[in-house]
Amino acid sequence: MTFGQQPQGNGNPFGQPQYGQNQQPYAQSPYTQNNYGQPQYGYAPNGTATMNAQTAYSYEQVQQAQRASVTKAYGEMTIGLIITAVVAVFTQMTGAYVAFISATGLIGFFLFAIVQVGLALYLGARIMTISSTAARVMFYVYAALMGFTLSSIFIVYQLSDIGIALGMCALFFLVLTMFSLTTKFDMLKLGPILMVGLIVLIISQLVLMFIPGVGEATRIICAIGLVLFAGMTMYDAQATRALFAHYESQGPEMIRKISIVCALNLYLDFVNMFLYILQLFGSRD
């Protein structure tokens, strides 16, 4: 409104940061890959997957542990979205965002955006050194800040349009996630393409901000952005699973950290898809 981790992005139509990580947007994740872009797994001599240097687990146990980890990441993402929604509604009811912008003007708007970007960048850069509790708190704070900013959509769009866009986004996100986690197609190979697409999208939006009377062009850009973030959602779903497979031997604390990073990426995919859907189908006031 997005890490030694996984792909990044930057920016949405409301000036929100996308993927404030310490790598290039949607670069390949740091887990080990082979020549075909597939994550490599370590196996013990008897054919069982190795969870750590001392203990070998069955393939079924490894798969079960990975599913639990992926579920944890999506759970953290859901909590972040709930925090954003609650803060956005509360901010709109109290008029806090309007009062803030009225008092600070564009300086306050850009300063607030910089704080959000900085928080995401710090989380991405320090995830391997800070505790999982600190990472979780930072993610929740980021979600709250996003909610404060997103309260502005209640000024621009009708409540019914916001509800419809949210429902469409949730269904779209669920379908994309299920497809990406069950298909044999490797979305991780598309990382460079998604990165280039994201850069072009950001530049296009910045240019259109300074060109009056380009309503139809804006809708085209929104449609492209929706398709792009659909691809990013599938990419991040597969990257989440691969990251857990790579770091599972480093203990529960590392798994908790990775779950926060993956949750932030998925969270930003959801928020940006929601905003593009809202701009495409919502009636602006």
Image: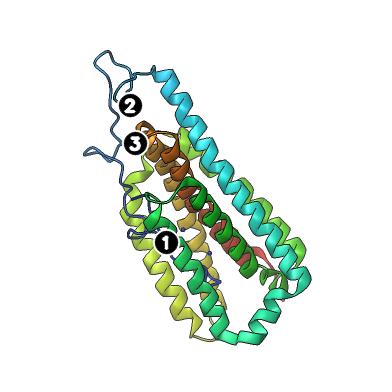
Q: Which callout, 3 or 1, points to the residue nearer the camera?
A: 1
> Does residue 93 appear left or right of residue 98 in this picture?
right
Question: The residue under label 3 is which amino acid type?
Answer: His
Question: The residue under label 1 is which amino acid type?
Answer: Tyr
Q: What element carries label 1?
A: helix
Q: Mark 1 points at which residue?
A: 122
Give above or below for 249 relative to 81.
above
> Does residue 71 appear left or right of residue 190 in this picture?
right
User: Looking at the picture, how far across and down is residue 110, in whole percent?
Assistant: 52, 79
Q: Mark 3 points at which residue?
A: 246
Residue count near mark 2 (Cα–Cα under 10 Å), binned few <14, some 14–19, many ≥20: few
Outermost residue, left side: 35
Q: Is mark 2 on a helix, strand or loop?
A: loop
What residue is shown at x 76% (from left), y 64% (from top)? 159
- The front one of 267 and 212 is 267
Give above or below for 131 relative to 1.
above
Q: Where, quadrant-wise, is the C terminus in this rendering?
A: bottom right
